[in-house]
Image: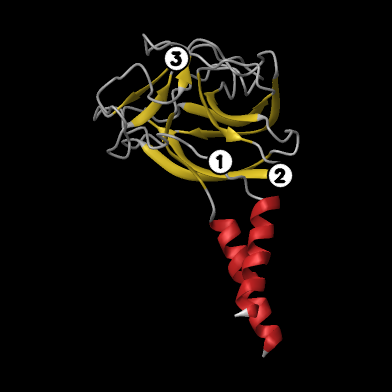
Amino acid sequence: MKKFIVVLLVISAISATGQAELAITNGDFEANAGPSTADVTDWYDNSAGGFWEDAWQSNDSWITPNGTQVVVFCSWDTVEGDPLAGSYLYQSIGISEGESELTIAFDWGHPDDVAAGRYDGLTVSVLASDGSFVADDATDVLGAAGITLLDAASYDHVALGTDGEIWTEVVTLSLSGANAGDEIFLRFNNYLPEAGADPWPVLDNVVPEPATLALLGLGGLALIRNKRR
């Protein structure tokens, strides 16, 4: 019994100093599912009333590459050379307790009506608020007063011309620049990977990824057991 308690304490310590206990709401975008739904439930974007000029959710058969509802980002507002400029989508995912990083998995790719050669780009970022920022549609968290950009990662892909393409990315973003008590925001945006590109990527299944922590905990358990034999 004592050995088991030690293992639990080790795993708890890893959890407290490593992976953030933060939550993503409606990460599969299935809430209020429907064709061309302008307002993405539980997320903020450029506009709640339109969709061609920002980001929207849809299960239209000519859009979704995986048969479920996805978010689509339009190509407007992108700026060549700036991976953080473009149609955006963000939400508050919780309060920092001093965690060092956040690992998330998400699916992204090209919509079902894609043509071969289209060049799509997508950026995921994590930001911290000192508590003064008020989230709202048409109010971007990036660049707002009281907001600190903590980390970001960008992805790009040239469409092969199949009937839609979608795949999974797993990324670890640093939270080391946040203070305990800061509100943490997760943000996605499309971006222009090169001049002449026309990015309209899709996003789906945004979830925290605890697999690394779980494997680390199991590894620690195996190590302690081996030492006791």
Circle 1/circle 2 CB separation < 8 Å: no
Q: CA distance from mark 1 to mark 2?
A: 12 Å
As drawn, the label of residue 100 is: 2
State the SS at label 1.
loop
Circle 3/circle 2 CB separation < 8 Å: no
- Residue at 69 percent across and 26 percent down: it is 149
What residue is shown with label 3?
A: 54
Residue 208: horizontal and vertical position, in percent? 52, 45
Q: How is the image coloured?
A: secondary structure
Taking the view exactly as shown, the residue that stands out farthest to the front is: 1
Q: CA distance from mark 3 to mark 2?
A: 32 Å
Q: Quadrant of residue 156?
A: top right
- Residue at 38 percent across and 22 percent down: it is 40
As drawn, the label of residue 22 is: 1
Disc 3 residue type?
Asp
Disc 2 residue type?
Ser
Q: Quadrant of residue 166?
A: top left
- Describe residue 202's horizontal placement relative to residue 152 as left or right: left
Taking the view exactly as shown, the residue that stands out farthest to the bottom is: 229
Residue 171 visible (yes or no): no
Label 3 packing within 10 angstroms: few (<14), some (14-19), many (20+) = many
